[in-house]
């Protein structure tokens, strides 16, 4: 008879032996490779070339010469660039709180379930984001027009002076109105998606405890929206300091108000394509990127610290609280 060994006594496979099945270790890299190629070709290489250009300077005598950090030193002392950065910082401080407040109110109204035709309302707020910035600026430029705009025509019929939306004192607010109209729906979608991720068990428990709609929004929804609000705030920082399309198009309607350095992005564009100062424009662009990184990190750090300070710590046992006497044995405590 032939003795058959049980399966548990079979000899283990030799250490180091490779399985004959197909290896999938590098499959993930093949899926990521198209994105990496586009990322390198469209972002990394242009940035590297711009950094290379920023280290040189064009001269009438001698042509292109190595300038080192001279372009950056010139940009740091450029009053027009500094003024443009301060202007967009003021624009951010005025426009972003209004935009986020409107987006938050719209998201809460849609999520409450009390709004009739909520889908139509949501679509109507989001549609302006689908309109290109150029088209939106041209449309609002027509509305702002002091001669041909509908507000000016209505003022003439009434017999009052036309509103000066494109004057020096109102221009920043007019641009802020265009940007707010464009991006309220975009931020609303982000906040509404975050609201949809909140477990409904929390709402049911709060309703059982007698909490109303406003109490639920204040105690449950708003704390849960902090990460989404922070994301919208970071996006707003980047978008504000990159402001370009709106002032560039409105410049033709108000050339005496919007000059070539009204925003840093417009200044860099004018230097490169009008003044033919490509090397200096590259340095200005890199400094603008550095300002955006610093501003974004500052907002992120300040928001994170405020959230950490507002978050309550774990409760201590009653025996560790000063002044609390131990309850008598058998007495009911609440």
Image: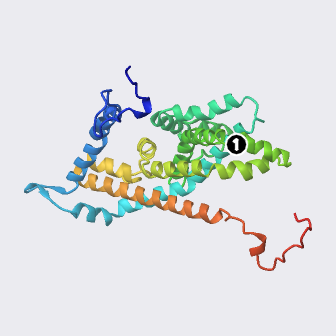
Q: Residue at x 22, y 47 (%)?
A: 49
The residue tagged with tag 1: helix, strand or loop?
A: helix
Residue 316 located left or right of residue 288: right
The residue at the far top in this view is: 1
Name the image quarter holding residue 74.
bottom left
Question: Which is more toward the observer, 158 or 22?
Answer: 22
Q: Is residue 148 visible?
A: no
Give the image location of residue 103, x and y in percent.
Answer: 63, 44
> How was the colour assigned to the protein in this rendering?
rainbow
Give the image location of residue 207, x and y in percent.
Answer: 82, 44
Q: Residue at x 28, y 45 (%)?
A: 44
Q: Is residue 320 above or below residue 258?
A: below
The residue at the far left in this view is: 62
Pointer 1 residue: 108
Residue 16 located left or right of residue 231: left
Q: Residue at x 51, y 62 (%)?
A: 301
Question: Which is more toward the observer, 220 or 185?
Answer: 220
Residue 3 located left or right of residue 112: left
The residue at the far front in this view is: 1
Q: Residues within 10 Å of mark 1 (few under 14, many from 20)?
A: some
Give the image location of residue 109, x and y in percent.
Answer: 72, 40
Name the image quarter holding residue 33.
top left
Q: Is residue 108 visible?
A: yes
Question: Which is more toward the observer, 317 or 271?
Answer: 317
Give the image location of residue 245, x and y in percent.
Answer: 43, 42
Q: Is residue 207 above or below residue 321?
A: above
Q: Which quadrant: the C terminus?
A: bottom right
Q: Is residue 118 above or below residue 173?
A: above
Question: Which is more toward the observer, 315 or 317?
Answer: 317
Name the image quarter holding residue 187.
top right
Q: Which quadrant: the N terminus?
A: top left
Q: Residue at x 57, y 55 (%)?
A: 94
């Amino acid at each position: 008879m032939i003795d058959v060994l049980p399966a548990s006594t079979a000899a283990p496979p030799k250490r180091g032996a490779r399985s004959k099945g197909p290896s999938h270790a590098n499959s993930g890299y093949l899926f990521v490779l198209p994105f990496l190629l586009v990322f390198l070709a469209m972002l990394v290489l242009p940035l590297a070339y711009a950094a290379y250009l920023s280290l040189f300077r064009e001269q009438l005598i001698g042509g292109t010469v190595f300038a080192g950090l001279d372009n950056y030193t010139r940009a740091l002392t450029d009053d027009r660039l500094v003024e443009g950065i301060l202007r967009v910082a003021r624009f951010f401080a005025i426009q972003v709180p209004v935009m986020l407040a409107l987006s938050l109110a719209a998201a809460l109204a849609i999520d409450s379930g009390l709004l009739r035709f909520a889908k139509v309302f949501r679509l109507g707020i989001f549609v302006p984001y689908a309109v290109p910035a150029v088209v939106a600026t041209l449309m609002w430029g027509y509305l702002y027009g002091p001669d041909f705009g509908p507000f000016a025509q209505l003022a003439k019929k009434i017999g009052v002076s036309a509103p000066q939306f494109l004057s020096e004192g109102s221009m920043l607010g007019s641009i802020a109105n265009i940007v707010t109209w464009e991006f309220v729906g975009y931020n609303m979608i982000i906040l509404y998606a975050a609201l949809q991720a909140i477990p409904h068990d929390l709402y049911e428990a709060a309703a059982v405890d007698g909490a109303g709609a406003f109490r639920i929004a204040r105690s449950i929804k708003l704390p849960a929206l902090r990460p989404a609000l922070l994301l919208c705030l970071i996006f707003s920082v980047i978008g504000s300091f990159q402001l370009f399309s709106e002032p560039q198009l409105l410049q033709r309607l108000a050339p005496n108000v919007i000059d070539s350095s009204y925003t840093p992005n417009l200044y860099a564009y004018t230097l490169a394509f009008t003044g033919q100062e490509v090397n200096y424009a590259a340095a200005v662009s890199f400094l603008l990127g550095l300002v955006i990184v610093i501003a974004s990190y500052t907002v992120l750090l300040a928001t994170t610290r405020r959230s950490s300070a507002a978050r309550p710590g774990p409760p201590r046992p009653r025996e560790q609280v000063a002044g609390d006497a131990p309850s008598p044995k058998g007495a009911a405590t609440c």
